[in-house]
Image: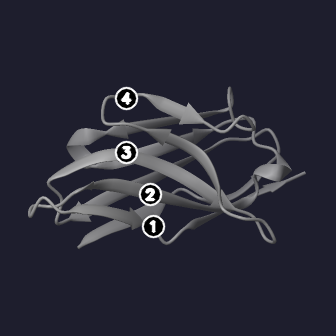
Amino acid sequence: QVQLVESGGGLVQAGGSLRLSCAASGNIFSINAMGWYRQAPGNQRELVATITSGGSTNYADSVKGRFTISRDNAKNTVYLQMNSLKPEDTAVYCCNVHGSNRYLHSFDSWGQGTQVTVSS
């Protein structure tokens, strides 16, 4: 089983910054893609950013130029640096990790979510 522990959410004023972290642990052999998703009240969950094992990144248009996703493979951790935050960025942010366990079975795990609130 793979566990994900997120941290870094909170309350910030518009224009401010936050950095989210998500550390994966447990039965892990390799990690492929890692990513962040968010869900605001009344909205469906949406992709924020993803990063492959090779470092290729993908961002939602709404966060391009403001958010940066990165990963530390040695620590099985993915980060999301969020700058120039806007009230519309307010949501619960969840990390997602896809990889293989020691039995070479694939897994797709989700974090519990961390609240990000941006005040105007």
**Mark 2 is on which residue type?**
Asn
Q: Amino acid at mark 4?
A: Gly
**Residue appearing at x 75%, y 64% in the figure:** 40
Give whichever of 102, 13 is nearer the camera. Answer: 102
The label shown at residue 111 is 1
Q: Which quadrant is home to the N terminus?
A: bottom left
The structure's colour scheme is: one colour
Mark with earlier residue (3, 2): 3
Number of numbered discs on residues: 4
**Residue at (68, 26) in percent of width and height:** 65
Q: Earlier in the sequence, mark 3 or mark 1?
A: 3
> Whole-Å distance between the Cαs marked 3 and 4?
9 Å
Q: Report how far apart the C-alphas of labels 3 and 1 lie in the structure.
A: 14 Å
The residue that appears at 90% across and 51% down in the rendered structure is 120
- Image coordinates of residue 38 in percent, x first then y, are 64, 58
Q: Is residue 25 above or below residue 98?
A: below
Q: Which residue is mark 4?
A: 55
Question: Residue 90 versus residue 34: which sits nearer the camera?
Answer: 34
Q: Which residue is mark 3?
A: 33
Tell whether label 2 touches label 1 (CB within 8 Å).
yes
Give the alpha-carbon distance from disc 3 to disc 2, as whole Å. 8 Å
Mark 3 vs mark 1: in front: 3
28 up-or-down from 85: above or below? below
Residue 37 in the image: x percent, y percent?
58, 55
Pick the front one: 42 or 23: 42
Residue 116 visible in rendering: no
The numbered mark at residue 96 is 2
Q: Is residue 20 left or right of residue 61?
A: left
